[in-house]
Amino acid sequence: MLVFFSLPRYNEEDGDEEMKVCLYTEGEKLFSKSGLGKAIRHQEKALESVGVPYTTNIKDDYDILHVNFYGPNSFALAKMAKKHGKKIVYHAHSTEEDFKNGFIFCKQISPAFKKWLIKCYSLGDVIITPTPYSKRLLEGYGIKKKIYAISNGIELEKFKCDKSQRKTFRKRYNFKEDDKVIIGIGLYIERKGIVDFVELAKRLKDYKFIWFGYSPLSAATKEVREAVNTKLDNLTFAGYVEQEKIIEAMNGCDLYIFPTFEETEGIPIIEACACKTKALIRDIPIFEDWLEDGVNVYKAKDVDGFEEKIKKIVTNELPDLTEEAYKVAKERDIKTIGEKLKEVYESVLDENK
């Protein structure tokens, strides 16, 4: 059911007054443990880092409404705010491509979902999306608004290389010091590659595999439910854990793999780069612009490729790329993202001058 929110007061002061942004995320609590939830928290920290005043209360006064979701309340609020002269920045965190291989029935409704996304995103005076790849997808939808590619960013000061955490991580999950430990992160959805992750655990019985993340299996596809219910001595599903334990895992494992089939960015790979954790990702278009095979990460196309590369990486047959990978994370530090967001906001307000 559509819920109507009270409109924010319209600010008719001239352009000399400091701009204020309203960050709005419909149903934020539902996404708090997902990549979207993390992206929203990063936005707040990014704006704080560059001194841009913001509110999350839609009843407050503001100049720009920054919308982070495509729900009916978001659509209604954006329309009403626009009618009252507010500028709209619509953040395109989702595409049809990353939606259709998610939960059960997503594939069947993805064409209708795409039409709805176009309708929502077109309300923006400008659109922000995390990567050049997702920008190209949106342009391919026929959306005529200006689109900026700005990373969701990373809290670089938190995700640090600290190999002293190796012992703590291994003790927590009963791994031995000489165990080869491979981690994965994501919701229990098909596109995250969790089925392939389990298949790799079956093939590489001498290695330990642990997956972090959780979502209700009732919403998952049959293949994902079967994968998560697989019982193997070398496979652990740790469920959702707090950020500190993800950092600990990044520093304590031998390899992070990201077998995802589709993303708009993929924050965990940036976190792995920041922690200088060896990383192996799927060779898909989303990563072409900023992650290069054999330069800052390793890539594989399928399960056979992952199996081959895993063996070579954990036995040090392949060179360590983590110093080059760290540069990727450094470019996406929260403060850098804050400066880019500020530039977009200022450009939107300048259109009236």
Image: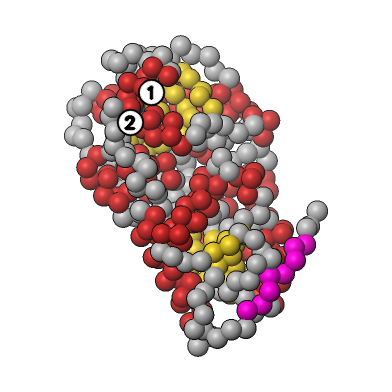
Q: Which residues are magenta?
A: 4-11
- The residue shown at (39%, 48%) is 155
Instruction: Describe the element under mark 1 as helix, strand or loop.
Output: helix
Q: Nearer the viewer, residue 159 or 184?
A: 159
Q: Nearer the viewer, residue 82 or 121?
A: 82
* Residue at image mark 1: 169
Q: Which mark is residue 200?
A: none
- The residue shown at (50%, 46%) is 38
Q: Which three-letter amino acid code belongs to the residue tagged 2?
A: Asn
Q: Residue furthest bottom?
A: 353
Q: Residue furthest top?
A: 233
Q: Is residue 172 something one can see in this rendering?
A: yes
* Residue at image mark 2: 251
Q: Is residue 103 above or below residue 174?
A: below
Q: Nearer the viewer, residue 159 or 144?
A: 159
Q: Is residue 180 above or below residue 264?
A: above
Q: Is residue 275 left or right of residue 191?
A: left
Q: Position of residue 305 (x, y in %)?
A: 34, 31
Q: Is residue 325 left or right of residue 146?
A: left
